[in-house]
Image (cartoon, helix red, strand yellow):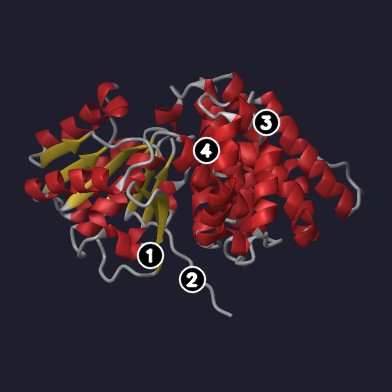
Amino acid sequence: MTYQFNTPQTIIHGAGASRELLPQLIRLGANRVFFVTDAFIEQSGLVQRLAEPLREAGLAVAVFSGVQPDPTVQNVLEGLAELTNHGADVVVAVGGGSPIDAAKAMAILRTNEEPLQQYMGYHKIPKAGLPLIAIPTTAGTGSEATKVTVITDAEQQVKMMIFDAHLMPTLALVDYELTLSMPAALTAHVGVDTLTHGIEAYVSRKANGLSDPIALSCIRLVSTHLLAAWQEPSNRVAREGMALAACQGGMAFTNSSVCLVHGMSRPLGIQFHLAHGLSNAILLPAVTRFSVSGAVERYATVARTMGVVPEGDSDEAAGAALVAGLEQLNQSLQIPRLRDCCGIEKPAFHRVLEKMAADALASGSPQNNPVVPTADEIIRLYEQAW
């Protein structure tokens, strides 16, 4: 069996990495730069600070700040129209997973035919898109190092996962200083999202010798730094560790796969507009409990990497300790259960359980899980997370 391993051509990581934008654009031969971001990031002044040296160097710059949370196909097309009008030769995504995912879709639609929906699934994009530089402002999705984008098809009420090497950013500038202002709740949600990436990449049926060490490093970094980053927002060591973990988590799962947590998370986002990181965090303990029996040794390694099991305990005991440790982590980070999330009412939740289970299975991610669930088992897992 062979494995394909993709990463950005260049990753620059550390304090001030975002200041490398101009030199890297010059290296790429860019003339017309198109920023993709959201309204919050633009209002923060970050994009203006990044763009000013570019304009002074004579590059033509335009900004699209209309990316919405969980971007839709229409949202992507709005940005694409402005990108095309600007005649951009390089796209720069600034923000969390939503701006980076939207920018990936815009970049490939500039060189490939519409509609975007035809590329849903695996390895369907015929041509490379425009060069894409990703500058993450959260330590969570790892989208700066993945060949994946998730875009909502509002008409079909489904989150489309598009997986193709042509979606991989050309360059990632991972500047942990941009994450210092993340609020505590967001730090917690995207931090456990990062942990989910590391765990699922490691226990996946598609795990391999190239992705495994990166997945374990991601898990170790989260275990070391997440609580400190949450408790002390200005803790630079913790913020740097989490930024590195997020990048590694993305690199790991995009070269292995995500599993059942992600398969169940996307329908929650569609039905209840629950943020992706939060829904992953809520689901992780219950799904881990369900899955441990399918990869006892690997889950035991995860537990030992996290330091939640005494030395000398059996693999079975380590798996049980891992589940308890994940539950305790969520409690420590004040991550709610589904019933405590704003806007999710129990009758509405039960009405869509069958559809969510069907959509989760249709995504393909649960089939990579150590224990492949039935639709009824997925429904029970949703109920346990309630």
Question: Neighbour class for label 4 at 10 Å: few (<14), some, many (≥20)?
Answer: many
* Residue at which label 3 appears: 330
* Residue at which label 1 appears: 165
Residue 60 quadrant:
top left
Residue 61 quadrant:
top left
Residue placed at 33% from the left, 37% from the top? 18
Residue 301 appears in the rendering: no
SS state under label 2: loop
N-term mark: 4 or 1: 1
The residue mark sitting in front, 3 or 1, is 3
Label 4 is placed on what type of residue? Gly
Question: Neighbour class for label 3 at 10 Å: few (<14), some, many (≥20)?
Answer: some
N-term mark: 4 or 2: 2
SS state under label 3: helix
Instruction: Look at the image and tell me in which quarter the N terminus lies.
Output: bottom right
Label 3 is placed on what type of residue? Asn
Residue placed at 24% from the left, 31% from the top? 47
Q: Evaluate if marks 2 and 1 touch, with contact meaning CB atoms under 8 Å apart.
A: yes
SS state under label 1: helix
Residue placed at 60% from the left, 45% from the top? 196
The residue mark sitting in front, 4 or 1, is 4
Instruction: Look at the image and tell me in which quarter the C terminus lies.
Output: top right
Label 2 is placed on what type of residue? Gln
What is the spatial separation of the Cα atoms under label 2 and label 1, in whole angstroms? 10 Å
* Residue at which label 2 appears: 4
* Residue at which label 4 appears: 277
Decide: is 161 above or below 186. below
What is the spatial separation of the Cα atoms under label 4 and label 1, in whole angstroms? 23 Å
N-term mark: 2 or 3: 2
What is the spatial separation of the Cα atoms under label 3 and label 1, in whole angstroms? 33 Å
What is the spatial separation of the Cα atoms under label 2 and label 3, in whole angstroms? 34 Å
Please indicate whether residue 260 sits to the left or right of residue 84 in the image.
right
